[in-house]
Image (tube, grey):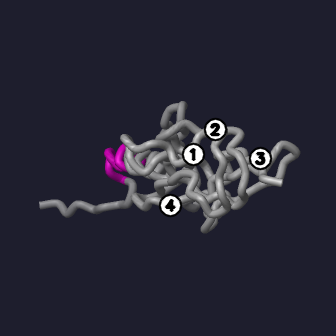
């Protein structure tokens, strides 16, 4: 009986399994693109595009990273027309605590500093995003249940003077 040697990446299903796992990671983390090389297998996945797998002549280290680290609270940017509340992490944006509940805030609503504006779900954890300023909600930039990226604008608030 011949002994079978196992080499990582030698299995015919390995590129497909790797692509499937990376696809789940892409969706779970809300990434738009991921590019990984393991041994002689190169996998690149992109939202809206297709997955490609191609052998590569030289081995390269595995690369899968998010460009900017997640922050603990929503960031804000002053602009000429108000304060922009940005996503502090990658995840799924929810305007309400449940599908049947009213949104936390809508355009035109007055908000207080510290008031909950939305929830971002990241890795099955619900993170409440609070307003850093008091004022009126001028614009809601994201649709309910849509993925958001770190630093993506969520709300524009005209601060109370």
- Percent coordinates x, y for residue 117 in the rendering: 58, 52
- Percent coordinates x, y for residue 72 in the rendering: 60, 68
Magenta highlight: main SS: helix
Residue 70 located left or right of residue 98: right
For marks 2 and 3 on the same chain, the one whose residue lies earlier in the sequence: 2
- Percent coordinates x, y for residue 152 in the rendering: 67, 47
* Mark 4 in CB contact with mark 2 (< 8 angstroms): no
Q: CA distance from mark 2 to mark 3?
A: 11 Å
In front of the other: 73 or 1: 73
Q: Is residue 73 above or below residue 118?
A: below
For marks 4 and 2 on the same chain, the one whose residue lies earlier in the sequence: 2
Q: Which residue is painted at 32% across and 51% down in the image?
A: 11
Residue 84 located left or right of residue 66: right
Q: Which residue is mark 1?
A: 105
Query: Which quarter of the picture shows residue 106?
Result: top right
Tag shown at residue 158: 3
Q: Rate crowding at label 1 as few (under 14), some (14 to 19) or many (20 or more) other CA atoms within 10 Å.
A: some
Depth check, mark 3 against mark 4: the one in front is 3
Depth check, mark 4 against mark 2: the one in front is 2
Residue 23 shows in this picture: yes
Q: Which residue is mark 2?
A: 107
Q: Rate crowding at label 2 as few (under 14), some (14 to 19) or many (20 or more) other CA atoms within 10 Å.
A: few
Element type at mark 4: strand
Looking at the figure, which quarter contains the C terminus? Answer: bottom right
Magenta-highlighted residues: 10-19
Q: CA distance from mark 4 to mark 2?
A: 21 Å
Tag shown at residue 127: 4
Q: CA distance from mark 1 to mark 4?
A: 16 Å
């Amino acid at each position: 009986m011949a002994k079978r040697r196992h080499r990582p990446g030698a299995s015919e299903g390995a590129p497909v399994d790797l692509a499937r796992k990376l696809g789940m990671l892409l969706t779970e983390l809300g990434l738009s693109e991921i590019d990984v090389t393991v041994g002689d297998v190169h996998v690149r996945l992109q939202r809206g595009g297709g997955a490609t797998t191609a052998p590569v002549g030289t081995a390269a280290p595995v690369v899968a990273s998010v460009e900017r680290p997640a922050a603990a609270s929503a960031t804000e940017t002053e602009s000429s027309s108000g304060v922009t509340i940005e996503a502090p992490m990658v995840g799924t944006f929810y305007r309400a605590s449940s599908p049947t509940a009213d949104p936390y805030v809508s355009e035109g609503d007055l908000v207080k500093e510290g008031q909950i504006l939305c929830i971002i779900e990241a890795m099955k954890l619900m993170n409440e995003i609070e307003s850093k300023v008091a004022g009126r909600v001028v614009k809601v930039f994201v649709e309910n249940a849509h993925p958001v990226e770190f630093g993506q604008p969520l709300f524009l608030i005209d601060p109370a003077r």
